[in-house]
Image (cartoon, rainbow, N blue to C red):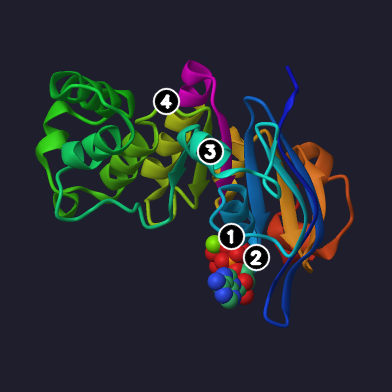
């Protein structure tokens, strides 16, 4: 199945006079792990935020799960928000709540489920992301960096989304924890049939779990495709990003 889940066409984004995206195109297919790559300030997080209705491009079309975000109704927006989970770079857990309370909050907010069922669901999500059962009683400050990411992931998965958005999920983790987190994402994609969109700088992540990606640079999409496809292109930004040629490792 290669149906398109997210389609960006001719996206132009500007903050004041500063142009960020100059007619950007990309397509994300069902069940793939897709990455937005590029240097710092190339507009990756901004594009991700546009996909989840937190920002709006100046022009162009963005379709998510078949819905055109330019003409979306408030009801459609509400339905769409329930179909995606988001993991922001900082983890975005409430520090005054335990992990369990952080997850339960979403059920209280979006469902009418009874407390007993919410309690069970929290346990299931904590297990799903590989955290030990007692983690639900801990506060974010009592967790390791890797555990914070997992807890935030459990929260993002609370409402059984079809789509998962991750902004730099492995930043701040050591290499081993990063690889474990990558493996978890790939397993969850298979288990839950997710489509995953992630912003990352992590070359190991790109090599290990990314199916396809868009490389942003010079306000454009420099290249889109699998790693092998993109490495066929000749472009200094591709060389730089993948440390090819005179910049380092020859592949
Ligand atoms: N709300 C905003 N108002 C003004 N400028 C913004 C806003 N959000 C982002 N920008 C600018 O847009 C550009 C792209 O930012 P963005 O956060 O999308 O970059 P990025 O590719 O995610 O970078 P990084 O890898 O450093 O996270 C930056 O120059 C940033 O300062
Ligand atoms: Mg960013």
> Looking at the image, is mark 1 or mark 2 earlier in the sequence?
2
Earlier sequence position, callout 2 versus callout 4 = 2
Q: What separation in Å lies between label 4 and label 1 (alpha carbons)?
A: 24 Å
The structure residue drawn at horizontal position 31% and vertical position 29%, both measured from the top left corner, is: 111
**Element on which disc 4 rests:** loop
Cβ–Cβ below 8 Å for labels 1 and 3?
no
Residue 239 visible? The answer is no
When the figure is inspected, residue 26 is found, relative to residue 239, above or below; the finding is: above
Q: CA distance from mark 3 to mark 2?
A: 36 Å
Label 4 sits on residue: 160
Q: Residue 239's x, y, as percent?
A: 78, 59
Q: Where residue 65 sits: x, y (%)? A: 65, 32
The nearer-to-camera label among 3 and 2 is 3
Q: Which residue is mark 1?
A: 55
Q: Distance of mark 2 from mark 4, alpha carbons?
A: 32 Å
Rendering quarter of residue 156: top left
Residue 150 is tagged as none
Label 2 CB less than 8 angstroms from ligand 1: yes
64 within the magenta span: no
* Tag 1–tag 2 contact (CB < 8 Å): no
Tell me if 167 is positioned left or right of 214 in this view.
left
- Residue that badge 3 annotates: 75
Q: Earlier in the sequence, mark 4 or mark 3?
A: 3
Instruction: State the residue position of label 2.
Output: 39
Please tell me whether residue 190 belongs to the stretch shown in magenta. yes
């Amino acid at each position: 199945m290669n149906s398109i889940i997210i389609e960006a066409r001719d996206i132009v984004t500007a903050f004041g006079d500063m142009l960020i995206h100059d007619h950007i195109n990309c397509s994300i297919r069902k069940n793939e792990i897709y990455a937005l790559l590029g240097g710092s300030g190339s507009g990756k997080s901004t594009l991700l935020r546009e996909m989840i209705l937190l920002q709006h491009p100046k022009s162009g079309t963005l379709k998510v799960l078949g819905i055109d975000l330019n003409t979306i109704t408030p009801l459609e927006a509400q339905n769409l928000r329930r179909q995606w989970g988001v993991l922001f770079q900082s983890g975005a857990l409430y520090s005054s709540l335990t992990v369990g309370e952080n997850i339960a909050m979403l059920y209280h907010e979006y469902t009418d489920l009874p407390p007993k069922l919410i309690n069970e669901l929290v346990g299931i999500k904590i297990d799903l992301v590989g955290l030990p059962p007692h983690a639900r009683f801990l506060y974010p400050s009592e967790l390791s960096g890797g555990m914070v990411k997992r807890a935030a992931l459990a929260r993002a998965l609370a409402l059984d989304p079809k789509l998962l958005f991750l902004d730099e999920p492995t930043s701040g983790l050591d290499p081993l924890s990063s690889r474990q987190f990558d493996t978890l994402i790939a397993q969850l994609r298979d288990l839950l049939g997710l489509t995953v969109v992630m912003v990352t700088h992590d070359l190991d992540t790109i090599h290990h779990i990314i199916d396809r990606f868009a490389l942003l640079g010079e306000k454009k999409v420099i290249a889109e495709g699998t790693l092998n496809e993109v490495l066929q292109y000749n472009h200094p930004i591709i060389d730089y990003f993948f440390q090819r040629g005179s910049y380092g490792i020859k592949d």
